[in-house]
Image (cartoon, rainbow, N blue to C red):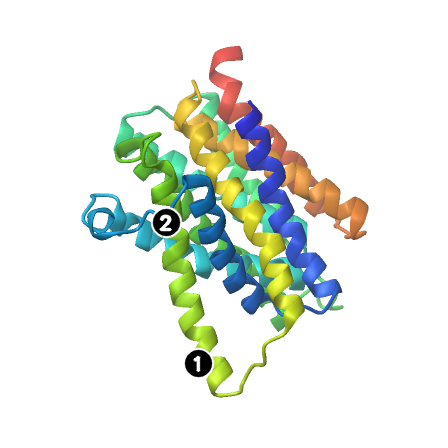
Amino acid sequence: MIYLLGSIVLTSYLTLAFKACEKWRISVFPAIIFNYITCVITGSIVNGSFPINSHTIQTDWFKWAVLMGVLFISIFNIVGVTAQKIGVAVASVANKLSLVIPVILSVYLYNETVAGWKLVGVLTAIVAVIFTCAPNVNNKDGSITVSAKIKIVLPLVLFIGSGLLDALINHVQQKYVTAENNNAYLISGFFSAACIGTAILLVQYVSRSRKFVVKELVAGICIGIPNYFSIWCLVTFLQRSSWESSASIPINNMGIVLFSTLVAWLLFKEKLSTINWMGVLLSLVAIFLIAFGNTLF
């Protein structure tokens, strides 16, 4: 249970940190790159050494770690933009209700069952995403503005990308990751993201399209350490949980949605419409039905 709570609190912190970056006028992209460099250093300290070598590269899971790194840096940037431009609640729900994707894939990959109340929970989760991400219609004719359309596209992209990332993490954890290579796998994923991001950042520095700012480095460090342990807690929880992954992932993700939304409401005074709040409440119903529906009813 401690690993589940750790994943919920630390992952929620990451989304909230992007909102804080906006408040303190810190550019998200460099902070994300420094975050991944910090993740590699943190993981190497936890591991006792830097684990990537010729043997690591030849392992079955290394190519998946590289792919995870690509998804890390892509999705993290989308999370940052969504949290700043639309809100923490929308970013959290679109990010974590993507559980629908790994839950559905678990049926085909691991012969798990999604039927009865669990199926109702999956469908409820989809409705929750739509409600929570629904934009306010301000035009007199009831039409959605162009900016509002963008606000729909961002969460949708985040929803799909996060779902694929969760499915990838779960698949590798099921097939390749053990207690012995857990840290090596995570560090390899973060190292992949750090290499890609650093290359882009160096080009920007050399071309003088961006200047180095100390507070972006500090922000990256403050995000990076919790980021490493958020993934570490998630992978450890999936390894040790007695639940099927089709229940474990929803429980983790719905906890993140609830916690981050409430904290954003308290700290950043984020305002949600009635239909948005309905989406948040439906997300709680969804986690309950997916995790416990078939055993209680």
> Which residue occupies the foreground of this view, 131 or 24?
24
Residue farthest along the top direction in this orientation: 296
Q: Is residue 232 visible?
A: yes
Q: Amino acid at mark 2?
A: Phe
In the rendered image, which quarter is residue 70 located in? bottom left
> Which residue occupies the foreground of this view, 101 or 73?
73
Residue 157, percent from left and from top: 47, 58
Q: Amino acid at mark 1?
A: Val
> Which residue occupies the foreground of this view, 118 or 44?
44
State the residue position of label 1.
203
Residue 166 higher or lower than 142, as above or below = above
Residue farthest along the front direction in this orientation: 48
Secondary-structure class at tag 1: helix
Residue farthest along the bottom direction in this orientation: 207
Q: Earlier in the sequence, mark 2 or mark 1?
A: 2
Residue 124, percent from left and from top: 54, 35
Residue 143 higher or lower than 42, as above or below = below
> Which residue occupies the foreground of this view, 66 or 212?
212
Alpha carbons under labels 2 and 1: distance apart: 26 Å
Relative horizontal placement of residue 30, taking residue 265 as reference (left or right): left
